[in-house]
Amino acid sequence: MKQVHCEIITIGDEILIGQIVDTNSAWMATELNKIGIRVKQISSISDDAEHIISALNLAANRADLILLTGGLGPTKDDLTKKTLASYFESPLVFNEEQYAYIERIFTAYGREVTPINRQQAEVPLCCTCLPNELGTAPGMWFEKNERVFVAMPGVPYEMKSLMQKEVLPRLIRHFKTPVILHRTFRTQGVGESMLASWIEHWEDQLPPHLKLAYLPSVGEVKLRISAWGDDREALEHEVSLQAQQLLQLIGKHIYAEGEDSLALTVHRALVSKGLTLSIAESCTGGAIAASLTQNAGASAYFIGGMVSYDNRIKSTFLDVPAAVLENQGAVSEETVQFMASGIRKKFSTDVSVAVSGVAGPSGGSDEKPVGLVWIAVDGAHGIRSKSFRFAKDRERNIEMTRLSALKMLLDYINSDD
Amino acid sequence: MKQVHCEIITIGDEILIGQIVDTNSAWMATELNKIGIRVKQISSISDDAEHIISALNLAANRADLILLTGGLGPTKDDLTKKTLASYFESPLVFNEEQYAYIERIFTAYGREVTPINRQQAEVPLCCTCLPNELGTAPGMWFEKNERVFVAMPGVPYEMKSLMQKEVLPRLIRHFKTPVILHRTFRTQGVGESMLASWIEHWEDQLPPHLKLAYLPSVGEVKLRISAWGDDREALEHEVSLQAQQLLQLIGKHIYAEGEDSLALTVHRALVSKGLTLSIAESCTGGAIAASLTQNAGASAYFIGGMVSYDNRIKSTFLDVPAAVLENQGAVSEETVQFMASGIRKKFSTDVSVAVSGVAGPSGGSDEKPVGLVWIAVDGAHGIRSKSFRFAKDRERNIEMTRLSALKMLLDYINSDD
């Protein structure tokens, strides 16, 4: 099967003057990869007819598929649509169906359709209009000289919706791309090379049509199995067997499959088990509580938290004995254990988590260097505590502590399963 | 003066497969804009010799300056350097100075220089080597047919350091770019159109060589004055007079000049005034405390915080009377006032801030819709409280609340100046 090559062209000055970062292209590239289409080049160009035409010509020489985003708004400097009409030698015509969408959107917001908005329903005659339910500019699908061109608005949520509902399914049909399956497993707390050494033999025995990718970020590594084939059912079965073997090898480091963050996974586990939670934070300064309460519905389990930054708060409000703070110090196993049991008792919750560490850059010593962190979880199974040695960078240490605390909490509440 | 046009080319598959978002190009475009160089196109291409040569040829036809990032690592798939040597018809030679850097870096980490790392000190004979103090791959400056080409590593902090220390100063000298000054004023809590209406007359009287840009983000708008000229001193004086007028019009909404975030501005103000702080958060769930404690040295003023998510915590630990929670509700002026005075008293701090709101998406009512937030600040000047009406989106409401609380706190502690 011939490899389908794609080029992405983003139109507009916002990226070229550095006002916005082009996150659209990375998202599109990821989605295209999932259906077996390879991105050869991404170009950001200005809202200039000559530049657009030249970019289209160059891309059409190199690729089978050209995706354009941006330049479809109602204002005068957005001349993409006129330029496309001229490139495809096709006049702009009024599209009734798209106009009905525009009217519906404006009516919903109690606004009147202006002549400028009416113009947004004009599209080149030769294109297939792709309905955009979230905005006034439709997507446009063109075919010329065995190339496919798709123009979409640059607003990220409009583009993503159009891609998912219209463009990707059409691309699969048009290019008859092979069946491609992906399964992503999210791990926390183990480095890429460590994971690689544990699963080396398993990875070596994978057949050529199954590939494993390591996708690392701060504190986390995602493992993605991708499989290519013709028969979806057989492929699903094969991937499922391989995934089972992977889970046997490193299952305890995998906290979720798919796109859910660790905070969302903990949130769901607490909701489903009906457990209440309290948190005592020192070096993370509220970041653990903030990441859980980003999720709608956190009030179902989250009772409250204490950011006990000063030792006075640890002793007065969390009942950490002054002698422990004096002798073992704020960053010690004894202190986090008292913090975890103190907040759990005071706030009367089923489980609690507490962290204390040297975030840096200053405050470290030979005995307790920057990056040393203690974490404790308290609940019906008693207290569990653990120390970590992170790095020199404050922001990274805070994030690593937040993730490690969430992972310890998740393991704790799952340990009675 | 002729406009200098630039093209940015990023090399490597990470962007094309969507594994990383290209943040480098936006940063480079912003810095180039500041010295009056306009970016015409940004291209991401694969690590492929033919593709690189063709991209260089196309860019050289359109631009005066071509900046390349990526593809300079020691591994085999990074063939940028060989391709550049062939493009400029110049052999790779060993550069003693760069090798000395590499040796120093490896010695500092207690590692031995491998033959592969030794190769990183090889550069095309015709280039000027730009020392990279943060990594093993040097920057390379080429000139050909009145075009300038600069190749840099793709690691963001290495690229930024090379740009700031080497590339930008050389570009200013080489292209004799005009004197360009920028002053950026950061505002919080007022929308773009509101600001525009207040400063309309001032903006209209700006001379053509002074331009104002509005740079909006969630809860904030940056106003950037840019000025072009030949005489730095005269231009500085002129911009300073205009900035004074701007400050007279909207000074109370400007919290800082330059790049400092609102959290960092509050952090600095508390440190310099020697005031201690406590925080009681409900709907922000710890995000206010987390943003302040991201800054190294927060322990100088931050005593602690309470995330009083459940009403039980508000009444038991912050002394909000049960009758107030019952009659006025958790999201009310009375409740946040009690929260602010409660945390200040309990944690014995100079100032305190408290927030309570309906973050959404559920939990709203006709009387108290999603997006309603109350904020209070307590301190030596007594309690100040204020309500806000944000939008429907939970994440956005939390961020708007965090910023509004920090702004109210900043105004409070600055009000005795």
Image (cartoon, coloured by chain):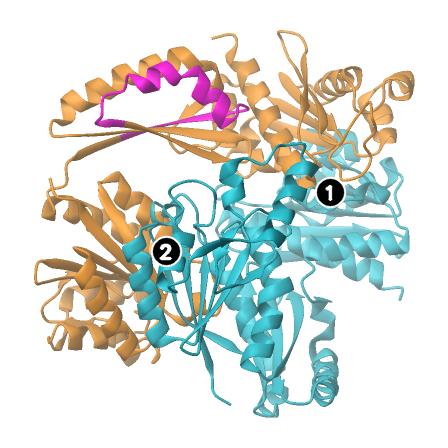
Chain colours: A cyan, B orange
Residue B321 in the image: x percent, y percent? 87, 17
Q: Secondary structure at mark 1?
A: helix
The residue identified by callout 2 is A83
Q: Nearer the viewer, mark 1 or mark 2?
A: 2
Classify the position of the N terminus of chain B by image quarter.
Answer: top left
How far apart marks 1 and 2 lie (CA) works out to 47 Å
Q: Nearer the viewer, residue A88 or A292?
A: A88
Residue B204 in the image: x percent, y percent? 32, 18
- Residue at (70% x, 23% y) in the render: B354
Q: Secondary structure at mark 2?
A: helix
Residue A367 in the image: x percent, y percent? 55, 51
Looking at the picture, does residue A384 appear above or below residue A78? below
Mark 1–mark 2 contact, CB under 8 Å? no
Q: Which residues are magenta?
A: B182-210
Q: Is residue A345 left or right of residue B188?
A: right
Q: Are marks 1 and 2 on the same chain?
A: yes
Is residue A203 at least partly visible in the picture? yes
Looking at the picture, does residue B144 appear above or below residue A302? below
Q: Nearer the viewer, residue A397 or B235?
A: B235
The residue identified by callout 1 is A293
